[in-house]
Amino acid sequence: MEELHVDPLETLYRDHHGWLRAWLRRKLGCTEQAADLAHDTFLRLLASRDVLSALKEPRAYLVTAARHLLIDRSRRQQIRQAYLDQLERQFGACPDLMHAPSAETILQAVQAIEALGRALQAVRAEAAEAFILHYVQGRRQEELASHFSVSLRTVQGWLAQALIQCHRHLAAPGA
C-alpha cells in the first residue's frame, strides 16, 4: 500500500488561513489588506519551510509572523508618507507644474523607498525608526536619544547598523 504524503504547509494553510485572515481583518479593518497580509504570511512560511517541522503552536507562530509583516508595512508607509510630505513641501507652494517631478522620477523614488524599506526590515524596529526620523525627517541625533529614552551612543549605533544594512542590501545581487 502506498503511503499518502501530506504537505505540512498545505495542512497549516487549510486549517488556519481563514482564521488568520479574520484576525487580520479585525486588526486592519479592511478585507482586502487582510487577505494580502495573510497571503504574505504564508509566503514567508514557504520561504522558511524548515520551521514547519518544529511548529508546536501554529496560530501563535502565524500571529507573530503576521505582526512582523504589519510592522514592515507600517515602516514602508512611514517612508512613503515622509517622501510625499517632502514633495508637498517642495512643490505645494509652487503651482508651476513645469518644475514638478516626472512620472518616471516619482516611480524611481518609490522604488528606492521600497528598496530602503526592504533593507530596514533586517534591523531592529528602533534602528529603522531612528534611521527614518534622522535621514528622512531630518531629526537630530540628540532628539532621537531623548525620543527613545536612550543614550546618544545607542542612537548612533542604531543609525550605523541601519546604514550598514542599507549598504549590504544595495550591494546584494538583484538589489
Image (tube, grey):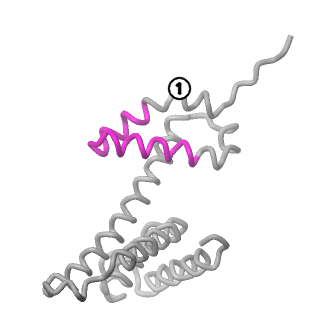
Could you classify mark 1 by the number of other residues whose Cα lies within 10 Å: few (under 14), some (14-19), or many (20 or more)? few
Name the residue type under label 1. Answer: Asp
Q: Is residue 34 above or below residue 151?
A: above
Q: Is residue 115 magenta?
A: no
Report the span colored magenta: 19-44
The residue wearing badge 1 is 15
Residue 1, x across and y down, in percent: 86, 10
Which secondary structure lies at badge 1?
A: helix
Specify whether 9 is left or right of 22.
right
Could you say where residue 84 lies in the image, as x and y percent from the top left? 27, 74
Residue 97 sits above or below residue 57 on the image: below
Give x and y (percent) for residue 19.
42, 30
Could you say which is closer to the camera, residue 80 or residue 121?
80
Asked if residue 26 is among those painted magenta in the image, a careful observer would answer yes
**Residue drawn at (41%, 83%), measured in percent from left and top?**
151
Nearer-the-camera pick, 105 or 128:
105
Q: Which one is in front, 34 or 153?
A: 34
The foreground one among 139 and 86 is 86
Q: Position of residue 156 (x, y in %)?
A: 46, 86
Q: Main secondary structure of the magenta part?
A: helix
